[in-house]
Amino acid sequence: MPGYQGKILRINLTAGSSVVEKLNPKWAGLFLGGKGLGIKYLYEELAPGIDALAPDNKLILITGPFTGTVVPCSGKLSIVTKSPGTGTILDCSIGGTAAVELKRAGYDAVIIEGKAAEPVYLWIEDNRVEIKNAGECRGLGCHATENKLKEAHGEDSSVLSIGPAGENMVSFACISSELYRQAGRGGVGAVMGSKNLKAVAVRGTGGVLAADAAKLMDVAYNAFKNDLLTDTNLWAYTDGTPMLVELSQTTGILPTNNFQQGTFDAFNQIKSESVAAVRTAKKGCTSCGLGCGNFVRAGRSAVEGPEYETLSIAGSNCGIGSLEAIVEFNRLCDDLGLDTISAGGVTAFAMELTEKGIHDFGIRFGDVEKYLQVPGLIAAGDGLGKELARGVRALAQIYGGQDYAMQVKGLEFPGYDPRGSWGMGLAFATAPRGACHMSAWPAADEAYGELDPFTIEGKAGLVKDLQHYNAAKFSLILCDFWALSFDVMAEMLAALLGREITAGDLELAGERIFNLARLFNIREGFSSQDDVLPQRIYSQPLPSGATAGKTLPEADFKNMLAQYYSLRGWDESGQPGQDKLNLLGLR
């Protein structure tokens, strides 16, 4: 089966068993792989309304058709589950080598269900599948766990692991690999911890079949030379995502002090030039032609990163202008197994609640000493950390401050203020997993581009189209930083599979995948009532910079949302109509 291994490995941790099943080829054709195919399997297999931390939830590790081939920037692994932080569908991706090792071991995906009686890890080596005792790794950070398992199974194995945060089922615990790569958002690490699964180690020695290997090599090489190594993409190597600090500061959307401001006085200390000054090396994922990763050493701390989302949400948003402190916060989160976006967001919220006298958490904006204690306290569930581990939405429900609880559907905001990018507000509100910049990133066209960021005109269509594009791209599992067209994706996929694939086919697949994610959430009780933004965005003007005096007025937002529903063929409650479902083959 060109592009696919045709096999799914199913692990039942309760029974301590594994079985190999055939991949559903019809689903692979309709949902491509990665994100889309993982959502399809979860939708079909998961009973509605289950507790995300219950044994009945499933954790799906899934590759894409390009994984393990010569196609550049195709080395990430998708992870799909129901989110314990939001209750929504949840898909994440993680870089490194795990996806390629799994595909080479002969599997398109691993579906993990049940719960082990004691801490365990999986060892997968081609046809050899073992559930092994992980007692010696209990309580270890991700770094020590990975090093221990590589000692046991070889440096050429790949390890996915959780830290203490995952073991303690913190709602925004992540899964780590290669020390500094994370599947970060929504609590995938908590789901892994709920199953008493400490790690997955994998090594494969096989290959991947292409329908026409020579043609695929030719097409992939041309795409690499003419479409990847261009000025449009090479910023990923020269600067990486820290370059967005300057862009966000200039355009007035850099989150500062829990989104109270869109500019940060100390931005010069955390911008790309400052990161480059302490950079020691570069790194990319398997098959990467960009190498966006920055290894940095600031003071006594070293990390691969920090990415823009960490520099903004765990930096300026917390009033922290010390790059050394942000690097250390990043390192702690990586080792403990915490999403830096949610960790930074909930810290900033606690800082504002303290300064406004709503509830005294004992931490204020710019307090580096207490800021650096937060990751350890959250992971352990101690003191202040026990409260912050609940996340922003839960804290607001307990203590108040809901108007400036910067979250959607329970997921904390990433690093873009919608008051300076109105399409970004719509993208946050309608993303399946909650406030998310990976479902669509209209800020590139608005705040950083040529479109007027302060109008709703054309934004519903822009967000819809970007959501379809990313859904297809992340199902093929191609890197977000490669700005390639549907046409290029289709040409490579056609060469791999040996049949005609058009740009329209991929766009339709993206729409199908996005609508299936919506159906999952509707089944879990979500509706248009959840497609909303915090009141701060609607009513509190930004005070400085290019966005001074700007809000995203609620009436404009609601109008934009109604336009979006109409363009999608959804009703007023956000439910896809029967005609749309028939067109997409979802009924």
Image (cartoon, rainbow, N blue to C red):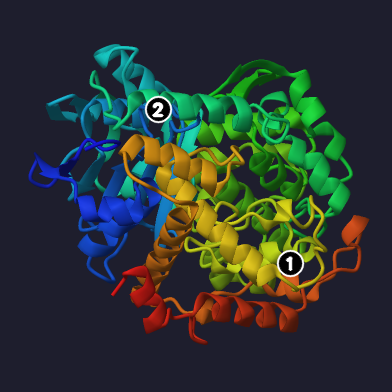
| SS for dot 2 | helix
- CA separation, marks 2 and 1? 43 Å
- The residue closer to the viewer here, 343 or 212, is 212
> Residue 198 at x, y = what percent?
29, 35
Which quarter of the picture shows residue 585? bottom left
Residue type at the position of mark 1:
Trp
Residue type at the position of mark 2:
Lys
Which quarter of the picture shows residue 27? bottom left
Quadrant (top left, top right, bottom left, bottom right) of the C terminus: bottom left
Q: Is residue 418 visible?
A: yes
> Residue 403 at x, y = what percent?
68, 73
- The residue closer to the viewer here, 544 or 364, is 544
Mark 2 and mark 1 residues within 8 Å of each other at the beta carbon: no
Vertical comparison of 69 with 439: above or below = above
Q: Which mark is residue 386?
A: none
Which residue, given by chain and number where applicable, does mark 2 sit on? Answer: 215
